[in-house]
Image (cartoon, rainbow, N blue to C red):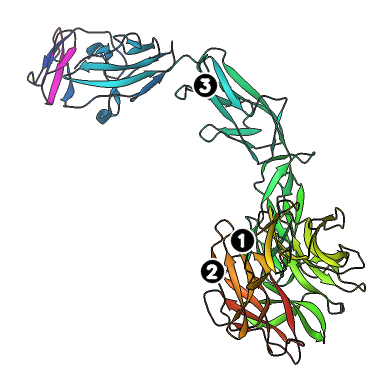
Amino acid sequence: ENTRVSPRALREDGSPAAPVIVTWTSLRPDVASVDQSGNVVALSPGQGTIQATAAGGGGHTATAPVVVQQAEFTVREGSPLMLSPGEIDTLHVIVATQNNRTVNPLVLQWASSDQSVARVSLAGVVTAAGPGKAILTVAGLLQNKSIDVSVHQVVTKLSVRPKISDEVQVPLTGTAKFEAQALTSENAPVPEAPLRWTVTDPGIASFDPQTGTLTGRAVGKTQLTVRGPSAGLSVAWNISVIAGFPRFAQPRVGVGINQRRALRANYADEQGNVLGPATNLTWSSDNPQVASVGEDGTVAGAAYGHAKITATAPGGKTVIADVYVVGEIVVASSRAAPNKFQLYSVERSNLAQLTKLTPAADTTSASDPAFSPDGSRIAFVSQRDGNAEIYVMNADGTGTTRVTNDPQADGRPSFLPDGQSLAFHSSRTAGKLQIWAVNVDGTGLTQLTRDSVNSSPAVSPDGQTIAYVSTRNKDGDIWLMNRDGTNQRQFTRSPQQRESEPRFLRDGSLAYLVERREGNRTVQQVIRADLATGATTAITGTDLAIASFAVSPSGDLLALVVNAEPQNRRNPAYRVYIQPVSSATPVPLPTVGLEQMITPAFRP
């Protein structure tokens, strides 16, 4: 490598003096040579000195150290180099170990493996000639390096999402996703083509090209632009950052004590159209003794009752969710008065502590509880108006409303997944039980079955299937039908036994009660079945006189309604036993005196 040095003449006070003629000498000619023009050439590794002596006498000299090192050079731009057709770029050769010093291009020689793809000048200026790949080689200073060059196809258009519209609304502190793809004239993708994103006013919105995420920073309007590699190829979106309205995906929720559940909110515009997930919300609870809420919107149940959780958006808009904290198991018990059942809640961790669900002053009857899918409502059967009808109340026992109204008895409500409608059985048709559906506000009453006797509906988690008990074949069997009553088909076929009490689990499997003869006795057993294969598994023994049951959504716990005096079938004494599916030891809920318990239900 070579370089040129030049002298600078100074006066005694350090000010510039007139130029002088000097004689150049290398004190280590084996390390570096110097000619009389000041051109220094590195010859071998080592340290030398270059001396300049002023002509004309006077003895004025100056020296400069010269260090010659073996050092690798590299191409600063790195490999591979991505270029667009017609693009020009300059490559720089540097020595990284010498503070990234740039090597004089005059001592280097450049070459291209394919001039039709990329051409390179002696100064390292690269011109992308056409689509393809080439290798550029630089040689000099007793070494050489190569760099891969890729020139993408000609881009003629951009495909973008969302589509260009009059305006894209983004909530304050909310986000929106944008995508752009470079295409050829034949609509072939060119993923390697560079795209440049810009926001006209970064104070209104910022954009992350790596994730394609635009974030609203301040209320106002701006523009997001993406530019392709070809001249004039660009797309622009008009952006309006608004103080969005937060909306809960689930505005009502039921939780248990010490249970946690995250509330999810979206931003919506004034018309209610969802704009995207809500972020940077501020959370509060009006009753933290019942339910508290964390900074991330996670609610924790603390005590039975009702709390309102408020989420406030950065723009000041608010939304409220109703949270009801209720026991894991709800049963109907005659504890308050003989032969009059009312609803109580209990935890599996403390079976001795029953808590009345409705206010103490409410002495009306209630049984057959059924939770809504979100756990915030309970449907039940009551004769408070003189006849067995379906009612719905909040999970804390407040806000009771009547759903059905008919002289004949209605019973066994089961929520559909939307939480806005129920399936139930009723004898309102010629005194024979049939399956019906109705909205929780009492509208939309629809009869689903019409022949024989059909009862005890249970709705699958996806809402597409209703299981029920039918005596179409003069025997109690489990049947299935679509939610609108079509495609009614028999599921169990066992003339030697009766099936009843269908219950769906969260995974879509079906549990039901089987009664059959074994020797000289009648036994009952809970069976779990796979609807797709028909395979069955017993999940209880046959030692208890089971009349009904409930199963937890996960399938790990059973609540069995048992006749504690099986020899007395005319006047049974019903108790509720709690049994883990993995254990054969059922534990009875403690009772007082002649108290009876029936119709258990599990919180979802």
Residue designated by label 2? 537
Q: Label 1: state its secondary structure.
A: loop
The picture places residue 125, in percent across and down from the top left corner, at 35, 12
**In this view, 126 is above or below 280:** above
Question: Nearer the observer, disc 1 or disc 2?
Answer: 2
**In this view, 45 is above or below 330:** above
User: Which residue appears at 43% of the width and 12% of the height?
Assistant: 85
Q: Quadrant of residue 526?
A: bottom right
Residue designated by label 1? 506
82 to the left or right of 463 = left
In the rendered structure, which disc, 3 or 1, sits on the residue that comes first in sequence?
Answer: 3
**Which residue type carries mark 1?**
Arg
In the rendered structure, which disc, 3 or 2, sits on the residue that comes first in sequence?
Answer: 3
Q: Which residues lie in the magenta part?
A: 34-58
Residue 90 seen in this snapshot: no
**Which residue type carries mark 3?**
Ala
**In this view, 20 is above or below 508:** above
Q: CA distance from mark 3 to mark 2?
A: 57 Å
30 to the left or right of 230 = left
User: 294 or 456, which lies in front?
Assistant: 456
Give yes or no for residue 521 being in the magenta stretch: no
Give yes or no for residue 45 being in the magenta stretch: yes
The picture places residue 209, in percent across and down from the top left corner, at 53, 31
User: 231 or 6, which lies in front?
Assistant: 231
User: 285 or 235, which lies in front?
Assistant: 235
**Which residue type carries mark 2?**
Thr
Q: How many marks?
A: 3
